[in-house]
Amino acid sequence: MRDRTLYRWQKEAIEVVREAWKTDEPNTTIAAVTGAGKTEVAVRLINEWDGIVTVVVPRKALMLQWRDDLTPHIVGRFGGGSIRGWGNETEYINIATLNAMRSGKVADFLKDDDRKHLIIVDECHNLRGNKNRKALDNIPCDAVIGLSATPHPSKEAKEVVEALCGPIRYSYRYGQALHDGVIPPFVLHAVQIPMENAERNELASIDNRIKKAMKESREWWGERRGREMLELAKRLGMMRKRLLNDVESRYVLSSNILNQEDGVPTMVFHDTIDGVERLARMTPNLNPAIYHSKSKEGNAEIQRFLSGDTQHLYSCLALAEGFNAPRVERAVMMSGPNAPLRRIQTLGRCLRGKTDKPNEIYFLYVAGTKDEDGLHNLLKTADIPDYISGDEKRQIVNHWRWDSANGFVSIEAPKAPKAFIPSTPQKCEKCGRTFKSEVGLNSHYCRDVKWMYEDPPRTFEEMFGSD
């Protein structure tokens, strides 16, 4: 059995779980930043558990990591497809994918077993989906431990995850982890990138078409025409996102960063497969490993990077969650979702190993778009401090503007967007519609708009940011 010295926070978290196990409400969620050592906490608790254990993971790559972390235990599995040299379930400890949990295989295996059963749900925020929240149905257990850097990405997720895994009884954030030296020091470079005139003109054209479609959707409130216009606005929104993803400066700057110090182990993330492939074509001299859902040699490419055969790994979002590569010293977030959960998980890929100098993360964004909202979401939700104090004050977040003529120019942090909040919301009891004031409430025409409750239209600024 491996003998690793525990950090203070790990000892405290283990003690919190032990105390919960003594009560009638033993379920516990541990919220700790990526790379802080949540798995080690779980392994120690598994060693103390008198009974059987099921570790639940969202994907195959995490099954393999957990199997290695649980050595020398003999570990079985449910799901994961074909894995050479690894058989099926065992008597004491098993790792199961969420798909396998939902399939009933685990429930069937446990139906005649009266031993105490502990379930550990890694990346437990994945339980928030309509399908995954059923993963623990009909599975007898005596305690559940949820692990995640982001257990509650939304209010609804909080209710679902806490119902299944218990409340957050221990939390460990970036500021604490940096101060304690648990995760490697890092610098986050938030970089505004420019758009060419042709790109801006195309963006303005799409914006006008979206605004027109949304205006028509409101004028034909609840009617078929209104729904069609709303769907058109969404399709145009996807076109807008693709345009922003493919801004030329993303590729130019990323290529510059990668070539400037081409010996630094680096992961690059782009929102699309086409974007990953395009960057690879631009940087053949770097011999990058490429991993995405359509790559036939994906696992081999990952091994090329992990073994040091190449210093660069380009990926979509497939490796944004749970992937463990301690050698990574730099990450480039070319583009990605604006939701904070995926951005936080992506950030964690660069906080695994420790080097003599701070790891570097580059976050590229187009000012005045949802890109910028994604930056604010990341900084706020992840609770990343601008700096940490100590013997020497050290800056964590730097803000830059970049263009090919002037390079990096330091700028002030962009102001956070104001949340859209109706000033005096008034709701019609008959049709359920909400208005900004009594004027709208008293003058509107009631129609059946129940179809809108599932997917209500929003303002252009909410959906796409203010340019």
Image (cartoon, grey):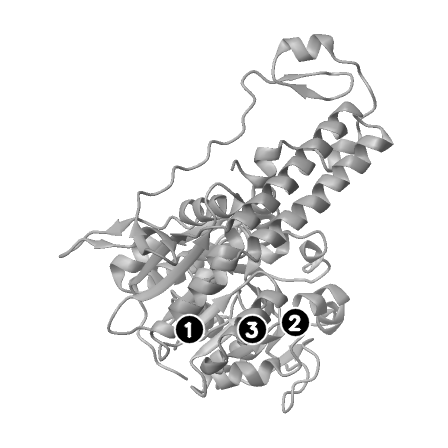
Q: Are marks 1 and 2 in contact (CB under 8 Å)?
A: no
Name the residue rendered at 46%, 55% in the picture.
Answer: 20
Q: Which mark is residue 62?
A: 3
Question: Mark 2 — residue?
Answer: 293
Relative to 167, is 389 on the left or the right? Answer: left
Question: Mark 1 — residue?
Answer: 266
Residue 253 in percent (x, y) is at: 42, 62
Let me know if residue 271 appears in the view. Answer: yes
The alpha-carbon separation of the residues under discs 1 and 2 comes to 20 Å
Name the residue rendered at 40%, 56% in the picture.
Answer: 16
The alpha-carbon separation of the residues under discs 3 and 2 comes to 16 Å
- Residues 458 and 122: in front is 458
- Residues 212 and 447: in front is 212
Q: Which mark is residue 188?
A: none
Residue 414 in percent (x, y) is at: 38, 41
**Mark 3 / mark 2, whichever is N-terminal:** 3
What is the secondary structure assignment of the residue under circle 2? loop
Q: What residue type is labelled 1?
A: Thr
Q: Which amino acid does label 3 sit on?
A: Leu
Q: Label 2 neighbourhood size at 10 Å, few (<14), some (14-19), many (20+)?
A: few
Relative to 103, is 383 on the left or the right? Answer: left
